[in-house]
Image (cartoon, grey):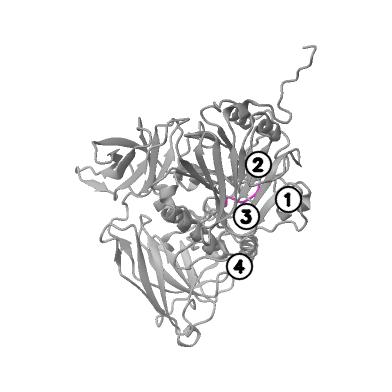
Amino acid sequence: LREGGKSMRPWAWVAAVTWMAVCTAAAAHGEQPLSRIAVERTTLAVDDAAHVKASPAVLGLEGQDSGWVEVEFLHPDPSGDDWIGVFSPANFSAAICEPENKRQYPPVLCTAPIKYQFAKFKNDGYGKSGKGYLKLQLINQREDFSFALFSGGLLKPKLIAVSNKVTFVNPKAPVYPRLAQGKSWNEMTVTWTSGYDIKEAVPFVEWGEKAGRQFLSPAGTLTFDRNSMCGAPARTVGWRHPGYIHTSYLKDLWPDSMYTYRLGHRLPNGTRVWSKSYSFKASPYPGQDSLQRVVIFGDMGKAEADGSNEYNNFQPGSLNTTNQIIRDLDNIDMVVHIGDICYANGYLSQWDQFTAQIEPIASTVPYMIGSGNHERDWPGTGSFYGNLDSGGECGVPAQTVFYTPAENRANFWYATDYGMFRFCIAHTEEDWRPGTEQYKFIEHCLSSVDRQKQPWLIFLAHRVLGYSSNSYYGFEGTFEEPMGREALQELWQKYKVDLAFYGHVHNYERTCPVYQSQCVVNASNHYSGPFQATTHVVVGGAGASLSDFITSKIQWSHFRDFDHGFGKLTAFNHSSLLFEYKKSRDGNVYDHFTISRDYRDVLACSIDNCPRTSLAS
């Protein structure tokens, strides 16, 4: 840290201007609040008359993995842009950036807070008294915490005072289990996070049928380091050790049976550290005729229940979507989150925050994810788009923190079956055009399904490879991701894909059954008989700041909604499918349609899908 008041060297002015440009660009999109803080420009201005106090000092006394902390603070010379930063580890000023060039002079503060809140938040008299009070929620993130008071706003922060330390009873405890479908229908994977390296403790899962015999299954362990990141802020101010990510494979499950499980670590002295107990329902047998319900959305992001960090409307959308799914969890069998998972954008602490937010869901039903631009994209790393959207993560945290049954988890495309459903999940941040490895995967996924057993064929991708009347697609005149549907629509039509879902565009839109930009049949709330064309649905409004539609009406665009929401598919049997669009604010249905189709209807010809025959042949 530099002492306040000293002049900046010329190189520092250049760095500051560059940093502010990055912050401004990030803030304009409204995706990562932490990017607004110019951490590297912090100066030391400790005031002995100021103080910050946090209580209680110890959390998780009864095994909880989250808790609320009361923070009291005093600043003798307050201003409207003072703020409180939550740091972890508590001794955040000990993290020193290594100089990237010879003219850079350490020490430089290079640890971003995991969250922040302005001192005047719900403290109306702060500007005069300098006294403030905040109630903030912490989650177990493997390290202790401290709270720091800053003046000078977010772009010119001055460190005024630091609180006492706050810690969890067992900061290394196993937390935030995430279920996912395995590579076979009767396999469930459990992934979780802990502070235990395999040299410290052996990870495993204790599991079995409810009220039945319990088994122990070992877990594999992964992690990554700063050098695994591709750029800033993931390699710099946003870096925080992700802990250790463990995955266990629970195999040979009985269809539809209820199982209980808990996470465990065996220490060298034989002691076992346990999580709380959880339960899940095993998947149905492929093709099984039973009630099956899947929630689908994209672009949810994370938000803070205490009101910190948030702007640009992430908080009500993300939390409302999460809470509505939790409320309806008894009527949900699986969740598919198609990209832009938590918008960490290089601030690694946010992956813990997100897995904590969805823990009630992901610990109970399979939580399948796809990859979006905010997980993968970074220049020079092989992503199809060479932008900075991942904040230097280049896909590493997403493919490590969550399990997917992909042959190559870095590619992030995969198929997963659930009862009567076949889901083909593409990865729009890798090339999907004819001749590519992904194109071959997509065609194989669509062509290999047995429609007698799995009549409902669903294509999913993050960016809109189909149809969207979102304003920025509309201004381009494409109404799609460039080169999106040109080749893929032939596959959708040939293999009779019932529905295609997308995120990326932060709103809701449903098309008619459409092929080559024309409605093959008029949009309706009920379709019956032979397949005609694929219906395309954008469900990217799960939490992120909303996207405008183009003002003119497009012929294939049937229903639009500028609001936060998510989709739900319900297969009643082999012949009847229901889709519902629900708003996150109230959980009510605002759009829906049904499909009724027998197996012989699936075998029937559709547009451009009949064998090329003539009387002569």
Instruction: Residue at 40%, 65% (x, y): give it.
Output: 137
Span of residues in magenta: 387-391
Nearer the observer: mark 4 or 1; the answer is 1
Going from N to C along the chain, the mark reached first, 2 or 1, is: 1
Q: CA distance from mark 2 to mark 1?
A: 18 Å
To which residue does mark 3 refer? 506
Q: Secondary structure at mark 2?
A: strand
Q: Secondary structure at mark 3?
A: loop
Amino acid type, label 3? His
Q: CA distance from mark 4 to mark 1?
A: 45 Å
Residue 318 vs 555, above or below: the answer is below
To which residue does mark 1 refer? 473
Mostly what secondary structure, the magenta segment? loop
Q: Secondary structure at mark 1?
A: helix
Mark drawn on residue 9:
4
Mark 4–mark 1 CB contact (< 8 Å):
no
